[in-house]
Structure formats: structure tokens, C-alpha cells
Amino acid sequence: MAGNNQGPLVVSLPLGAPQPGESLQRWLYTALREAILSSRLPSGSQLPSTRALAEHYGMARGTAQAAYQQLQSEGYLDTSNGYGTRVCAVLPDTTLNAGYVRRRVMPVAEQQRDAPDTPWAQRLQAEKPIFMGSATQPGLRPFFPHRGDVLAFPIDLWRKLHTAHLRSSRLLDMLDADPAGLPALRSAIAQYLGIARGVRVGAERIVILGSVQQALDLTLRLLVAPGETVWMEDPGYPGARQLMKASGVAMVDVPVDREGLQVEEGIRLAPAACMAYVTPSHQAPLGGELSPARRLGLLRWAGEQGSYIFEDDYDSEYRFVAKPIPALRSMAGADASVILAGTFSKLLFPSLRLAYVVLPPQLVEGFTRLVSLTARHANSLSQAVLADFIEQGHFDRHLRRMRKLYAARAETFAEAAERNWQGLIEVPPIRAGLDVVCRLHGMDELDAQARLAEAGIDVMPLQRYCVKPQAPGLVMGFAPYEETAIEQAAKDAARLLRRT
């Protein structure tokens, strides 16, 4: 039966080698038939001409023609549609063919094998990444946290800058780049950090990566041997916690309060830890800042112990009540011990996958070698576009615009909560960020999450961020949702949570 399905054009068709004593015609017929029945050649696929196939396999053209003709006569190939030789849309004897496929001897490479059982694999099996799977793709369903509004991004401007780097005169820019990143982007970031975060650093101390998660991964590889101790905030960012578990380090959970990481408690629990992971400018997920006294105490501890501090500059750009506070890395005495990491994926759009790390001088060479060995370099075309975006002032304008937009949505969220959630959910003052920890009254977190999901509302239970139990709470985002959506979702949430 002739098919109208327009499948792919098959340019290269590796078919293996004939068995000893097997004729080329029989081999070609059998190999093509098996490729069709196994859907390796899907319906509508256009096969190479008999001349091209014969030249490729070093056989007479008549041999290829005979194999094609046999397959055509049996209903596997079609030449009647005027578009060359194609695989038929409907194959003959589908029941028999299915049995034929089942009876095939499975190649060694396709045979079932057990999952790997290395230490890394075992730890990964025990820790499903928190943002892996369908739960990471809720679209624009309120109130999923840790998301910005990609619809507000100036995509036409970005496209214009991107197109400028695809001119034929700039094709050499598309070759491999420096593992540390494009000099133009590193210089632009250095200038930005000096103005916005109070960090005075040369471009040579900055390395461009794909994410803060990658920065933490490489830092752990470079500085912490399996079994050595690292401080982790509790509650804290689950992606960092899961990466530490998978890396095999000995994690010490240091409690967090309204002044941030309890440094003295960390010293009591593990005074000789190799490293501390902190989110000092906007604690993840509670949202506070590390107090000045604790900042000094943390730096003093790192200096005395020869330890390192990994500063995740989490959501620091989005403060609504005051200017962004300086980074921990900007303080006196931080140069030798603080590793500052930040991302552009939240500030611009998630699929950009560009971040940076500011390194102490003694770590630059080793870190750059590690990047080169594990990832070569981050996408250099995107780096070039981002450098232009920053240098031409678009980045700063975009941040100011989004800060104002998110502040308005935070206010809308708080007002909607006040109107609808009395006695159900308590929303604290929102000072910064893309989301907020809301306290539940008289309700289990997982039960509340399940009820809200019925109404198309996505939240994250606070227990996903904690080791030591906390008062029941939900991490709820507001940044990507328009005011009407926030108000409607708040009403729906109240209806579901009040249901007995």
C-alpha cells in the first residue's frame, strides 16, 4: 500500500556486515527489512538511490536494485509517489512482523544490564534531584517557587544582539573559547559586581560556568575529599544539600534563624570543617540576611582554620525595601577564603544556563583546569551576547524593571493572602526574592500540597528544605504570576484548604 507519510531523508545507512558465505543481495534485503520492522527506518523514510547505496557498499547497482525490488514486491517499499524510494506507511503481515521482531537475537549492546552500583550511583539512587521530572515543569501554575517571569524578558532585543554575532565576518568567534570564559563577559561581570555587590575583583579571577550548581560541584571536587566535613544551612537550598550527599562529603547541618547561619553553633558542631555553604544575602529558603556580627564570625573562623566559604549569591538582586546589601565577598579578609557564585539564569531566563564564580587567587588555575577537563567551556555564543547585553546597559535596565514588577506582585500576593487566608496560611513581610515561606495553621504540609494541586496550584513543602523539623510551612512563589492569577489562585487555595 502506498503511503503519503513524508518521513526523513536517509543519508547514511550503516547496516553491519554480511555473514560468511551470505550473498550481498540477500544480506542487503535482510538488513533493510530488519531496519524497517524494528522502526529504525520509520514509515515514510526516503532511502538512498540504488546507485548511491551500491557505491557506498561497493556492490553492483543491479544487486541493490534486486534487493529494493524484492522489498517493494513484499510491500515494504514504495516508489509510486514520485518522491524516490520510501518505506510504506502500512507494512504487510503486521502480526507476523511483530513476531519476527520479537524473535530477533538482541545484540550484546542492547541486552539488559543491571544499573551501576558504584558509590556515586548508590548515592544518586538515594537522592532524586528536587527539580528533576514533571514537578519542575509546572508552566505558569501559581505558586511554584524559584521562578522569574520569562514573558517579561526583552526577547526581541536579545534576538537582535544574538543575530549580530552570527554574521559571516564573526564566524571565528564560534571556535572553542577560553575555559575560564570570554574576556569581554568576565570584564563586564567584574564591573557589575563592583557597582552592585561591592566586590572589587579583576576579570582574571572570574570563571564562567553553566550554573551555581556546577560551581559548587567543581568546588567540592577541588577542595573537599570524600568524608571531609562541610557546613550546610538547615533549612537550606535542597539542590546544594543533595549535591553534597552525592559527592560523599560529611555534611554538618548548621541551624539558621532570623540572623542567618548560626556560626557559633557551626563551630561547636564541626570546628575543623573544610568549607561552609551559605546564602548570606537572601537565605534560601527563609529569606533573611546574615547579620554583620555573624559575617565577621564566619570570616574569622575561615581565616583561623584555613577553610573556605562558598557564598551562593541567591536572589540578592531582588530586594524591595532597600538597596542590595554588599556580598560577603566584599568584606575585608574575604579575598583568600570566599568563593562567590551567582547566576544569570534566574535574572534573565532559565535556559540561558550561564553563571559565574569569583575565586581566591590560589584557586584560579586549578578551577580553570577542572572546567577545561569536565566541560571545556560554557557556551561562547551566549557568553558574547550576554556581554553585549551587560555592556550596553540592557542588563541594569532589565533588573530595575523586574525589581519593580516583582515588588508589585509581592504586594499583591500579600494582600490576597490577607483577604483569603486568615486562619489558614500566614504570609510574613516580603522583603526580597521570588518566593516566600508561608506558615500553615493546623494543617500538614503534604496534605495542603495535595489539596492545592487539585486546584492547579503548585507549592513546595518546607520540609523538603529541612533536616531538623520546622513549624509546618509552604514555600510559595509570586514573581512570574500576574495580579489576576494571584488573586484567583488565592481564592481557590482558600476554598480547597477550608474543605473538611
Image (spheres, helix red, strand yellow):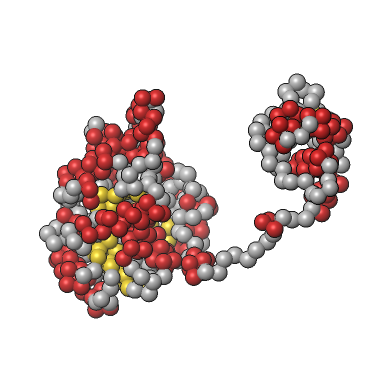
Q: Relative to 360, say whether 141 is above or below.
A: above
Q: Residue at x 81, y 50 (%)?
A: 20
Q: Quadrant of the N terminus?
A: top right
Q: Is 276 on the left or on the right of 440, as rendered?
A: left
As drawn, 65 above or below 41: above
Task: Find the residue positioned furthest to the left.
Answer: 332
- Can see residue 314? no
Rendered location of residue 382, percent (x, y) = 37, 38
* Image quadrant where residue 140 sits: top left
| Residue 159 % position (x, y) | 38, 29
Left or right of 7 on screen, residue 27:
right
Nearest to the observer: residue 261 or residue 474 = 261
Q: Position of residue 387 (x, y in %)?
A: 28, 37
Is residue 129 shown above or below 394?
Answer: below
Residue sitting nearer the eye, 70 or 473:
70
Residue pictured at 82% horizontal, 33% vertical: 63
Residue at screen point 79% across, 31% down: 60
Counting every numbered tag in the picture gives: 0
> Can residue 18 be seen in the rendering of this structure?
yes
The residue shown at (49%, 70%) is 119
* Residue 295 shown left or right of residue 254 in the figure: left
Q: Position of residue 262 (x, y in %)?
A: 24, 70
Farthest residue toward the bottom?
Answer: 268
Where residue 381 sits, quadrant-wise, is: top left
Furthest residue in direction top, as rendered: 82
